[in-house]
Image (cartoon, helix red, strand yellow):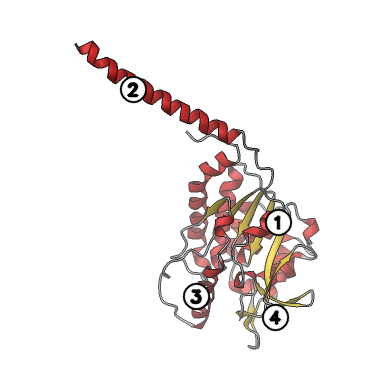
């Protein structure tokens, strides 16, 4: 009787195994019959000092051998993106981030259209990335995104010198003075779109990785002075401009909500937050890009 009783159980196990095997083959076939993405776009959001987390993401992507075909950057994302597009390695960008302070990229100005003058950022970029660097000099196609505050239009900068374009993209309104470029008065692109995934698609990407540094959540503490209050207010408003997040093929959101938007002493924690988030996304990324199988 024991052998007779075992037969249905064995048959059930065999059918379960065959079903599992069939689902695996179907999944494998449906995945590998899709064409391999030819141009991976990378969209880097704004986030002030939290932009350092972008470097941690880049470190993981580069270690995994994921080729980046084009980059779109907003505000701090434009600074990191321009540096990587110019040929700086993630380790070189990390070294820059560990030394960077507000005094290197801004100075106090007579309040008119902004509390601080961010024009020193242009000198910093010329020194770090190469003097007079233009978009056509870049190793990877790159776009810096700004906002025409008069016309209320998103402006995608892809021609001319890099330094003034990045400065315009980083000009957080009221905190930094706006930039005058190509006959426009430009401020931070995050005012209208802090995660412009559509720009990467327009540049020819057929797979887009987006990194969001303004996740919703409570601040780690109350603002202590005017600058922190302005920063917290503006970036809270910018969270509402992340309406293109669901257009990304892969969305990476480092856990940075508890980290200050203005304190460079958090650089190590921000780098690790970027690495950790990228590692979580990596298996799916490799699978999507036909670089690995998911078992």
**Count of numbered badges drawn on the protein:** 4
CA–CA distance between discs 3 and 4? 23 Å
CA–CA distance between discs 2 and 4? 69 Å
The part of the image, by quadrant, that contains residue 217 is bottom left
From this view, report whether residue 216 is shown above or below residue 227.
above
The residue carrying mark 4 is 150
* Mark 1 or mark 2, earlier in chain: 2
Count residues near mark 4 (Cα–Cα under 10 Å), then give few for <14, some for 14-19, many for 20+: few
Foreground disc of the pair 1, 2? 2
The residue carrying mark 2 is 13
CA–CA distance between discs 1 and 2? 50 Å
The residue carrying mark 1 is 202
Kind of element beneath mark 3:
helix
* Mark 3 or mark 4, earlier in chain: 4
Residues at discs 2 and 4 in contact (Cβ within 8 Å): no
* Mark 2 or mark 3, earlier in chain: 2
CA–CA distance between discs 2 and 3? 58 Å
CA–CA distance between discs 1 and 4? 24 Å
**Residue 196 in view here:** yes
Relative placement, left or right, of 45 versus 272 is right
Kind of element beneath mark 4:
loop
* Mark 1 or mark 4, earlier in chain: 4
Q: Which residue is painted at 49% across and 80% down in the image?
A: 229
Q: Position of residue 256 (x, y in %)?
A: 47, 62
Kind of element beneath mark 2:
helix
Residues at discs 2 and 3 in contact (Cβ within 8 Å): no
The residue carrying mark 3 is 232
Q: Position of residue 214 (x, y in %)?
A: 51, 65
Q: Position of residue 199 (x, y in %)?
A: 68, 59
């Amino acid at each position: 009787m024991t052998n007779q009783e075992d037969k249905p159980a064995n048959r059930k196990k065999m059918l379960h195994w065959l079903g599992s095997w069939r689902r695996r083959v179907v999944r494998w076939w449906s995945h590998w019959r899709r064409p391999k993405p030819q141009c991976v776009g990378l969209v880097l959001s704004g986030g002030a000092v939290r932009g350092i987390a972008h470097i941690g993401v880049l470190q993981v992507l580069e270690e995994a051998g994921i080729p980046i075909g084009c980059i779109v950057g907003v505000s701090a994302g434009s600074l990191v993106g321009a540096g990587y597009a110019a040929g700086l390695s993630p380790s070189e960008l990390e070294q820059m981030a560990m030394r960077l302070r507000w005094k290197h990229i801004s100075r106090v100005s007579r309040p008119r259209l902004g509390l601080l003058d961010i024009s020193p950022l242009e000198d910093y970029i010329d020194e770090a990335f190469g003097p007079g660097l233009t978009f056509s000099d870049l190793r990877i196609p790159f776009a810096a995104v700004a906002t025409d505050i008069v016309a209320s239009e998103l402006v995608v900068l892809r021609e001319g010198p890099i330094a003034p374009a990045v400065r315009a993209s980083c000009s957080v309104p009221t905190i930094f003075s706006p930039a005058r470029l190509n006959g426009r008065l430009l401020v931070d692109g995050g005012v209208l779109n802090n995660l412009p995934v559509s720009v990467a698609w327009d540049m020819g990407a057929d797979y887009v990785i987006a990194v969001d540094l303004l996740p919703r959540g409570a601040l780690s503490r109350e603002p202590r002075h005017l600058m922190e209050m302005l920063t917290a207010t503006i970036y809270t408003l910018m969270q509402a401009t992340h309406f293109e997040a669901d257009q990304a093929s892969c969305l990476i959101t480092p856990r940075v909500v508890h980290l200050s938007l203005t304190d460079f002493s958090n650089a190590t924690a921000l780098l690790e937050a970027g690495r950790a988030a990228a590692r979580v996304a990596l298996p799916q990324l490799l699978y999507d890009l036909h670089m690995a199988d998911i078992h």
